[in-house]
Image (cartoon, helix red, strand yellow):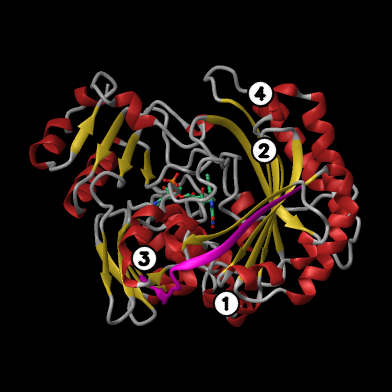
Amino acid sequence: MINNLPTYSVLCENFKGDLILPSDEGYEKALKRWAATAQRNAGLVAFVRDEEDIKAVLRFAREEKLEIAVKCGGHSVSGASSTSGGIVIDLSKYLNTVTVDVENKIAHVGGGATWRDVDLATAPHGLASVAGTVSHTGVGGLILGGGYGYLTGEFGLVIDNLISARVVDANGEVHECSEAENEDLFWAIRGGGGNFGIVTSFSLRIHPQRSEVFLADLHFPGEKVKEFFEALQEWLKVRGDRDLLFVFFQDMGNGPVIMAHCFHNGTLEEGKKQYKVFYDLGPIVDNTNLIPYLSLNQAIDDDRPYGTGLYWHGSIFPSPITHPDAGQKLWQSYHSVVKKEPEFRKSTFAILEFHHPSKLMERDNEEMTFGKRGEQINMLVGIGWDGILGHEPTSKAQVYAKEIAKSCVGGQDLGDEGYTNWESDTPTGFARSARIYGDKYPKLQRIKAKYDPSNMFNKWHPIEPKA
Ligand SMILES: Cc1cc2nc3c(=O)[nH]c(=O)nc-3n(C[C@H](O)[C@H](O)[C@H](O)COP(=O)(O)OP(=O)(O)OC[C@H]3O[C@@H](n4cnc5c(N)ncnc54)[C@H](O)[C@@H]3O)c2cc1C
C-alpha cells in the first residue's frame, strides 16, 4: 500500500488537494475513464490543487520509484492517463479554470479543463477556440496531440493557436514556453503529448464567432454507399474553409447507416447550399438545424457516452479521387463485422473526417512536432462493446478494427500514419514512437533528456531520453 511507504506522510503534510487511496470513499469514481477499457486500479489518485502539489507528488514518486499517470479529461482510449498500482496526478478537479482576455482574444485555460469549460467561458464574449468536437473531452491530451475541431478549416489545429504554456517538468521545475521562450519545449509539446512535463496552463488564441451555426445530420441506407461517395467527390470540389464533414458508419438506433454530419459556420441557407449534393441524394433522416454556437461541441456528446469497452484504430483514408471505391469497400467490411458480431453491433463505427486543408497546410512541417499536414482524411475505426470489466474481447476487436481500416485499400498495410490521439494500443518500448515521429525523433530525444531524463512521463507514444 502506498500509504505505508516511508515518505507518504511527508507528501500529506503540505498537500492542498485531495489524496485518494483505494480504501477511501470516492476511489472508484476517481478511476473512471471515458472508455471502460482505459480504467486501471491506481495505488493513489492525487487531485492536485496547484503546481506545488504537482511538485510534491513528482518528488514522492521519484523517491519511492512509483509509476505516474497524468489525467485531464480521461478520454485517452489507450489508458494513457491511468496506472496499475502507481499514482494518478489528476488535474481535472482544481486546475480547470478558464479566463478570457477579451481585448487580446486569448483564453488562459487550466491544464485540467474540458472543452465545455472553454466554450462556456469564451462564447458569451462572441469568441471561440478551435476545440474538441465532444465537449466532455479534456483540453490536455487533445491539445498536446494536435487538436482538430469544427473550426480547423478556418484556424488550423488547436496547437496552431497555442501562444504559450506553463509546464512542470519531471524535476519539478516550472517553465513558461512559447516561440520566444524555451522554444525547444514549445516545439516538442505541440504534437509530442505529455512526454515532457505537466502543462498547468495553455494560452490559446481565440477568434470572433457568430452566435448561430449550421449543423445537419443526414442518414442514408448502406445500399446508397456508391452514390454517397460519388456525391462526396462533388462536394470536395465546392467545400469551403467554413465547412467540416464527418462521415459516420454507425448504428444510430435503427440499424447501421451512413451519416453525413455536416457543419457550416454560417446561416441555414448557406449550409444547405454547401451540402446540396447530399440533400439531392434523398436522406432517410434529415436533421438540419441552426444551433447556438455554444451547443455545437455538445451536439454529439450523447452519441459518445462514458463506460463503453473500446478498441480504436486510427489511420488515413485514401483520397476518394484516386480510390473512388474505397468508401464502398469500407462500408462492406464494417457492415459484415457488425452483422456477424452482435456484441459489437451497437457501438462499432467508422468515421472519416473531411477538414478543409488550406489552413493546416499554411504551417511548415518543421515548425513543431506535429507534422502530418496535408489533404489527408483522418479515419477512425472503433470496435465497441458493453464495458463490463473482466469481459474484454480486445484482441478480437483489434483484429476487426485493423481489418475494417485496411479494407478500403484492398487489405494493404496502412502503416502508422493515423492521428496519434486515436490510439488504443498501450505502448511497449520506443520502436513504434520512433517510427511515428520519424525524422523528428532524435531532436525529441534530446529535449526529452533535458526535461524528463528518467522517462517518468511514458504513457503516450513514449520517447527514449538521449542527450
Ligand atoms: C469522445 C471523444 C471525442 C474526441 N474528439 C476529438 C476531437 O474532436 N479532436 C481531436 O483532436 N481529438 C479528439 N479525440 C481524441 C482526444 O484528443 C484524445 O482522446 C485525448 O487524449 C483526450 O484528452 P484528455 O485530456 O481527455 O485525455 P487524458 O486521458 O486525460 O490524457 C491523455 C494523455 O494526455 C496527457 N495529458 C492530459 N492532460 C495533460 C496535461 N495538462 N499536461 C501533460 N499531459 C497531459 C495524459 O497524461 C495522457 O497521456 C476525442 C476522443 C474522444 C474519446
Query: Label 4's element?
Result: loop
167 left or right of 316 in image: left
Mark 1 to mark 3 CA distance (whole Å): 33 Å
405 left or right of 145 in image: right
Q: Earlier in the sequence, mark 4 or mark 2?
A: 2
Q: Is mark 1 within 8 Å of ligand 1?
A: no
Q: Position of residue 388 (x, y in %)?
A: 54, 20
Question: How many C-alpha atoms fall within 10 Å of the one at disc 1: few (<14), some, or many (≥20)?
Answer: few
In this rendering, the answer to whether 414 lies above or below 63 is below
Query: Label 3's element?
Result: helix
Query: Label 1's element?
Result: helix
Quadrant location of residue 266?
bottom right
The circle on residue 139 is none
Q: Position of residue 168 (x, y in %)?
A: 28, 58
> What residue is drawn where x is 37% and y is 30%?
31
Q: Quadrant of the N terminus?
A: top left
Magenta stretch bounds: 204-219
Q: Please check the rendered image and state whether residue 217 is part of the magenta-colored stretch, yes or no.
A: yes
Residue at the spot of label 1: 366
